[in-house]
Amino acid sequence: MGLELFSLIEEFLREKQIMVCGVAHPVLFSEKVESSSSEFFAPDWIAIMGAVPVAPSSLFKLLSTKSHILLYPGGVREALHHKKLFRPNQPEFVRMTARFGATIVPFGAIGEDDMFELALDYNDYMKIPMLNDYIRDASRKSMRIRDESFGEVASQDIFVPGILPKIYGWFNYLFRKPIETKGMEEALKDKENAKQLYDQIKYEVESNIAYLLKKREEDPYRNTLDRTLYRMLHSPLHEVPAFKP
């Protein structure tokens, strides 16, 4: 659901004075979202957090101004708790990144399942006739991001998972070695070269998530009580030790 973005963006801003711009599904900027929020104007708040509607033109503009961009190539289907990485068939963002000589930093994040219990997922909604029809109708009317895609990647039904709060958890992040694309523009025009880099990035993201899931089990402060006691006795509120790398 992208809840880890708020902490990530806040930390980059606080520690590095860097504003990270996320690219979000256009439905979050739509009139429907606007009309459903009166005092709290969701699209404005999303924009304040640096997000822009996902589109090649948005990515082009951000790269051309040397902005720091947060990109989830798997899109809506990946974000809404299908618990799997979905990647578009064409590695276009790799080529566009190389065009501007930008740096790609693969990363992984976990923790939503420590904060919320997933009560209703997509398959559960599809078993409820009224909700089934509503989701399909809303998805049909929403802007499609990848008309050229097929298979699982092309399936982008819009819905909000049913979640129940748990006792407060926390997120774990892991960033891999940066991948420099400066000087690679010509090489990445070759489909095989572009796919090879694209697959490498996907592998590193998957490895990050697998590593974090494994190491989380060794975290002596994963328990809320242990973590709270440590914070009271030893560290500032924003500094809590985790597992050993």
Image: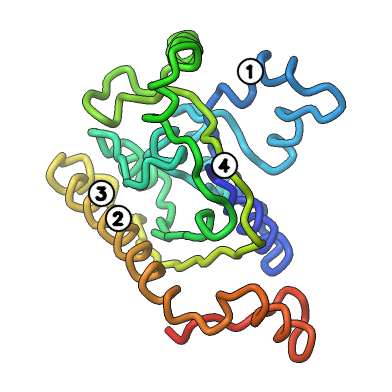
Q: Position of residue 24 (x, y in %)?
A: 54, 34
Disc 4 residue type (three-letter): Ile
Residue ranking furthest to the right: 39
Disc 1 residue type (three-letter): Ser
Q: Which mark is residue 201?
A: 2
Query: In the figure, residue 238 lies in which quadrant?
Result: bottom right
> In this figure, which residue is indicated by the disc labeled 4?
163
> In this figure, which residue is indicated by the disc labeled 1?
30
- Give me the C-alpha separation between circle 2 and circle 1: 31 Å
Which of the marked residues, 1 or 4, is nearer the chain's N terminus?
A: 1
Do the residues bearing badges 2 and 3 touch, measured as CB atoms within 8 Å? Answer: yes
- Give me the C-alpha separation between circle 1 and circle 3: 31 Å
Q: In this picture, is 45 found above or below 236? A: above
- Give me the C-alpha separation between circle 1 and circle 4: 23 Å
Name the image colouring: rainbow
The answer, for residue 177, to whether it is visible in the render is no
Left or right of 125 in this view: 169: right
Local crowd size for mark 4, using a 10 Å CA cut-off: few (<14), some (14–19), many (≥20): some
Local crowd size for mark 3, using a 10 Å CA cut-off: few (<14), some (14–19), many (≥20): some
- Give me the C-alpha separation between circle 4 and circle 3: 33 Å
Residue ranking furthest to the bottom: 234
Label 1: which secondary element? loop
